[in-house]
Image (cartoon, rainbow, N blue to C red):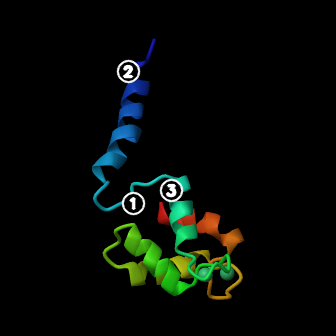
């Protein structure tokens, strides 16, 4: 039997994010990973700022340049200016 409280909590967690969909990216981690990999145009395994900007543009961001800069600021742990394979999981959490 489903407790009323559990039902309400489920309702809030399931439905509230959907109301925010206009401002949020509504893709899965797998889709995001594929988009980021597709945007690695020079296939060096890293996403530089231009490639990230393209990725955010693909994702429908209204300010892809700003988002790319912020994403690098948040996710570039070794400060080499690009998002590497190791940092891409951070990038995905950031972008979601
Ligand atoms: Ca690249
Ligand atoms: Ca880096």
Q: Quadrant of residue 30?
A: bottom right
User: What residue would you read off at disc 2?
Assistant: 4
Q: Are marks 2 and 1 in contact (CB under 8 Å)?
A: no
**Is 77 placed left or right of 51 in the picture?**
right
User: What residue would you read off at disc 3?
Assistant: 31
Of 50 and 23, which appears nearest the observer? 50
Question: What residue appears at the point 63 percent right and 68 percent down from the top-left corner?
Answer: 88
Q: Earlier in the sequence, mark 3 or mark 1?
A: 1
Dot 3 beta carbon under 8 Å from ligand 1 = no
Q: Residues within 10 Å of mark 2 (few under 14, many from 20)?
A: few
Checking the image for residue 61, the label placed there is: none
Please tell me whether mark 2 or mark 3 is closer to you in this view. Answer: 3
Q: Is residue 60 above or below residue 24?
A: below
Q: Quadrant of residue 22?
A: bottom left
Q: Gap in Å between the C-alphas at discs 3 and 1?
A: 11 Å
Estimate the x, y position of residue 34 in percent, counting from the top left.
55, 61
Checking the image for residue 25, the label placed there is: 1
Please tell me whether mark 2 or mark 1 is closer to you in this view. Answer: 1
Q: Gap in Å between the C-alphas at discs 2 and 1?
A: 30 Å
Estimate the x, y position of residue 91 in percent, counting from the top left.
57, 68
């Amino acid at each position: 039997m489903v407790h009323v409280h559990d039902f309400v909590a489920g309702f809030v967690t399931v439905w509230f994010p959907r109301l925010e969909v206009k401002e949020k990216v509504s893709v899965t981690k797998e889709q995001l990973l594929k988009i980021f990999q597709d945007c690695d145009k020079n296939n060096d395994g890293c996403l530089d700022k231009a490639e990230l900007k393209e990725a955010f543009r693909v994702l429908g961001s209204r300010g892809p340049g700003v988002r790319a800069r912020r994403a690098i600021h948040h996710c570039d742990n070794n400060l080499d200016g690009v998002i590497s394979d190791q940092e891409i999981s951070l990038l995905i959490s950031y972008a979601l």
